[in-house]
């Protein structure tokens, strides 16, 4: 007869074996031996034990799968993952850590972390921090993004970003760290900073020399290289000369600079010559061993080691080379070469543009000088004959009017030619002064009196406030020229019914201040910085067809600066303009005829 319970009854021995198979505990095994086989609770107990064993096996499989997944994630992670025990020994070292630090996992595991990836100068601080945390539980570095310096197996140091997490298990600590190589990010930031510095230098410097010097300094300091130089090809394309060089000033650098400036490199000679001839970047790991470097001995004295040189192009044409040196061992960097190529192109375009502008200015100056000289001869004849005609007593009134018009315009043309010649001399960097004692009060009053006919014709009131000032040691004719231009300008741009105020006063013991203020049309703010450029005319002057060539203030600035003074303009559209001139009360120009070198405008 079939039993009511479909499950077969097990003997005590069989049940014990089953429980042993499923890892049952000793107490459960003993209870099973004693349990009556015919009781209903017996089968339920066996079912519960089997179910528990299945769940335990499944949990173990899940744990194993998760561990395998964790290992796979860490093995393929873009970041390096390192674990250490409380003694500072490495317990986990993934594939990215092998790549980043150069140590195989089989060697790294078990090594001291401090002796493996921490630079010698930082090891004591690291070990002290570990001891402090283990003793007190206090630390300010865990669970934070840290910017640190790490050590590669080959001895080089590089920047890293690291986050460390402590973990306490079974009464002891382990420490897990995710590490990112920050070399690329920080290098990119340095490149951006260096390029920004180059652009600012090129935009803000007043001369090509200063712009180039500032750009080279910004480039070298931004990239952390010790020397930067710019080489330019001559017009014939036969050689390169150093147009600018910057260095840190460390021992040996001055001698290296002197030789660099003295060299003329043929195509293919030295790193600049090679980069220029080949049209490709040159990277030299150790310049002290490069027999193709003419400055090899001086480079060794200055401890220079690595060099890079890129060709300079302008509109596709090779025009020079950009060269950098450092005392550090640097491996070839593709992104650095790309950045230097772009920067070299900027420098090349800037230098070539400035060179073209200088050549254009030279040709214009030669043209102005030639035309001015050629025009002066016939103009002198015209003015001579006009003077003879004006003295004719029987000249008809209409003819006398014509003669006056000719005389007035000839005088205006003579002044214009004089201004052109003067500016040409200034552009060339030289013009003559004839310094002597000048009663400036009398000279200013004479200039105001001379301008009265023009003021009356325009319906303008000229007012003066001339405080006593000591005699100046200056060129009287040039100061008279200055005053004529300033007062004439004020009258030209002041409408009928307006005022022009001429003031003179002391400013302490060292300075005399001349001011010419009008109530005229004023000058737009965006045009004021260009007022002293030659041939510049404001938009209002052009729109109102005010006579002038745009040379007056250029002439004034040159005269003032030649006397050691300063000139400035303040203005508001519709509210008038004030020109202020500060002249030294005791200028340094020696008495007698002198020659002054003046900076080009």
Image (cartoon, rainbow, N blue to C red):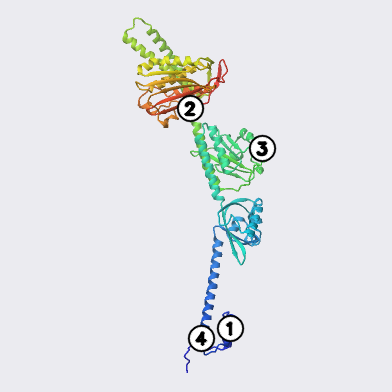
**Residue marked by disc 4:** 41
**Residue marked by disc 1:** 29
Mark 4 or mark 3: name the one nearer the start of the chain: 4
**Residue marked by disc 2:** 361
Residue positioned 55% across, 67% down in the render = 68
Q: Position of residue 402 (x, y in %)?
A: 34, 12
Q: Are marks 4 and 2 in contact (CB under 8 Å)?
A: no
**Residue marked by disc 3:** 252
User: Label 2 vs label 3: CA separation?
Assistant: 39 Å
User: Label 1 vs label 2: CA separation?
Assistant: 109 Å
Mark 2 or mark 3: name the one nearer the start of the chain: 3
Residue situated furthest top in the rendering:
393
User: Label 4 vs label 2: CA separation?
Assistant: 113 Å
571 over 19 or under it: above or below: above
Q: Position of residue 204 (x, y in %)?
A: 50, 34
Q: Nearer the viewer, residue 109 or 426?
A: 109
**What SS does tag 4 mark?**
helix
Which picture quadrant has residue 526? top left
Q: Position of residue 274 (x, y in %)?
A: 59, 40
């Amino acid at each position: 007869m079939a039993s009511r319970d479909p499950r077969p009854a097990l003997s005590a021995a069989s049940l014990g074996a089953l429980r042993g198979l499923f890892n049952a505990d000793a107490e459960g095994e003993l209870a099973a031996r004693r349990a009556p086989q015919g009781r209903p609770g017996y089968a339920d107990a066996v079912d519960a034990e089997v179910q528990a064993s299945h769940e335990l096996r499944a949990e173990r499989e899940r744990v194993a799968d998760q561990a395998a997944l964790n290992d796979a994630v860490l093995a393929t992670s873009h970041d390096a993952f390192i674990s250490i025990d409380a003694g500072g020994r490495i317990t986990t070292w993934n594939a990215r850590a092998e790549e980043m630090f150069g140590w195989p996992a089989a060697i790294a595991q078990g090594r001291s972390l401090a002796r493996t990836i921490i630079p010698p100068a930082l090891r004591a601080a690291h070990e002290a921090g570990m001891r402090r945390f283990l003793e007190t539980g206090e630390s300010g570095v865990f669970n934070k993004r840290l910017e640190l310096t790490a050590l590669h197996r080959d001895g080089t140091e590089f920047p890293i970003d690291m986050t460390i997490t402590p973990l306490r298990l079974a009464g002891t600590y382990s420490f897990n760290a995710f590490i990112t190589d920050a070399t690329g990010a920080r290098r990119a930031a340095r490149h951006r900073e260096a390029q920004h510095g180059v652009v600012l230098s090129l935009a803000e410097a007043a001369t090509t020399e200063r712009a180039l010097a500032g750009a080279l300094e910004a480039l070298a300091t931004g990239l952390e290289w010790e020397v930067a130089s710019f080489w330019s090809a001559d017009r014939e394309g036969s050689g390169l000369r150093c147009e600018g060089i910057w260095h840190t000033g460390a021992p040996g650098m001055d001698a290296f600079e002197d030789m660099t400036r003295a060299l003329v490199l043929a195509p293919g000679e030295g790193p600049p010559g090679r980069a220029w001839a080949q049209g490709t970047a040159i990277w030299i790991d150790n310049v002290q061993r490069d027999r193709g470097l003419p400055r090899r001995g001086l480079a060794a004295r200055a401890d220079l080691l690595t060099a890079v040189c890129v060709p300079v192009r302008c509109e596709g044409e090779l025009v020079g080379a950009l060269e950098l040196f450092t005392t550090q061992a640097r491996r070839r960097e593709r992104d650095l070469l790309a950045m230097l190529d772009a920067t070299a192109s900027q420098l090349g375009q800037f230098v070539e543009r400035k060179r073209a502008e200088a050549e254009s200015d030279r040709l214009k100056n030669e043209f102005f000088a030639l035309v001015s000289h050629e025009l002066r001869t016939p103009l002198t004849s015209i003015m001579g004959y006009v003077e003879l005609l004006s003295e004719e007593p029987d000249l008809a009134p209409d003819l006398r009017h014509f003669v006056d018009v000719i005389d007035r315009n000839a005088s205006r043309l003579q002044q214009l030619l004089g201004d052109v010649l003067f500016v040409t001399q200034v552009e060339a960097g030289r013009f003559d002064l004839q310094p002597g004692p000048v009663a400036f009060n009398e000279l200013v009053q004479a200039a105001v009196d001379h301008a009265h006919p023009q003021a009356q014709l325009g319906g303008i009131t000229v007012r003066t406030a001339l405080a006593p000032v000591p005699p100046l040691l200056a060129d009287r004719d040039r100061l008279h020229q200055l005053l004529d231009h300033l007062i004439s300008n004020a009258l030209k741009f002041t409408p009928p019914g307006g005022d022009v105020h001429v003031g003179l006063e002391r400013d302490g013991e060292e300075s005399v201040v001349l001011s010419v203020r009008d109530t005229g049309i004023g000058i737009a703010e965006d045009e004021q910085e260009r007022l002293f450029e030659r041939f510049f005319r404001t938009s209002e002057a052009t729109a109102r067809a005010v006579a002038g060539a745009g040379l007056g203030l250029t002439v004034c600035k040159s005269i003032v600066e030649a006397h050691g003074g300063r000139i400035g303009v303040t203005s508001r559209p519709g509210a008038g303009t004030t020109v202020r001139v500060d002249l030294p009360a005791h200028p340094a120009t020696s008495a007698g005829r002198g020659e002054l070198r003046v900076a080009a405008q």
